[in-house]
Amino acid sequence: MSQRPAMMLIGSFTALISLGSLLLTLPVSLTDAAHTSFVDSLFTMASAVCVTGLAVNDMGATYSLFGQGVILTGVQLGGIGIMTVAALALAFSNNSSLQSQLRYAAMLDARTVADLRKIVVGILAGTFIVEAIGAFLLWLMLAGDPRLGDAPALWTAVFHAVSSFCNAGFALFPGAWARSSATSASRSSS
C-alpha cells in the first residue's frame, strides 16, 4: 500500500468509514438504539470523514458522548486529510523505504523527507492551535448557558470548533439538524 498512494487513500477512507460505522452502531454510542440503523451509521460516518456535514439524525439527541467522539474523530481525520496523516506516518517511520517517503513528499510539494516532516508538522500544529483557540472562545460563550441542558460546555465547544474548522457542518444543538434540513429543502425547491 505504501508504494501506491492512491490505493492507500482509498483503503484509508474505507477502513476509517467501516470502523467508525461499526463503532456508531454499538449501544455505547447511542442514546436510543431503536432510532438508528447500520445504514444511518454508515451514512453519518461517511459524511464525517468526507466532511460533507450531511446527517440523517440529530447529532446531540441520537449519539452519546462516545458516539459524538467517534464522529468527531472522523471529522478531524477527514479534515486534516488522511493523506497528510499517512505522509506523517511514513515520514517518521524507520521501516518505510526512502522511495515511498519521497513519493509522499512529492505529493505535498516537498523536495526532501525533512521538508515533508516540516510541512506535516506545520499542518497539524496549525490545525490544533486554531481549533484550540476556537474551542476556548466558544467555551467562554457557552459556559453556564442553560440551553445546553446536560451537555458539557467544554465538549460542545471542542466539537463545534473542530467541526467548523474542518468545514464539516455538524452541530450538537437540539433541533439544529431539523433546521438545516428544512433550509436545504427550501433552497432546493426554489
Image (cartoon, grey):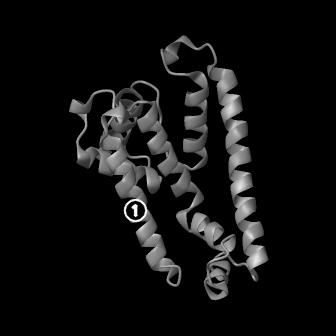
What residue sits 42% from the left and 71% below the top? 10
Drawn side of residue 13 relative to residue 140, left or right: left
Q: Position of residue 63 (x, y in %)?
A: 38, 32
Drawn side of residue 150 relative to residue 189, left or right: right
Q: Position of residue 185 (x, y in %)?
A: 31, 41
| Quadrant placement of the C terminus | top left
Q: Quadrant of residue 41?
A: top left
Depicted 12 relative to depicted 55: above or below: below
Drawn side of residue 156 relative to residue 35, left or right: right
Depicted 172 relative to depicted 92: above or below: above
Depicted 1 relative to depicted 38: above or below: below
Q: Quadrant of residue 184?
A: top left
What residue sits 44% from the left and 78% below the top? 7
Q: Quadrant of residue 99?
A: bottom right
Q: Depth check: 172 or 180 in front?
A: 172
Looking at this rendering, what residue extends furthest in the bottom direction?
99
Of the residues shown, which amino acid type is indicated by label 1?
A: Ala
Q: Which residue is mark 1?
A: 15
Mark 1 nearby-residue class (10 Å; few <14, some 14–19, many ≥20): few
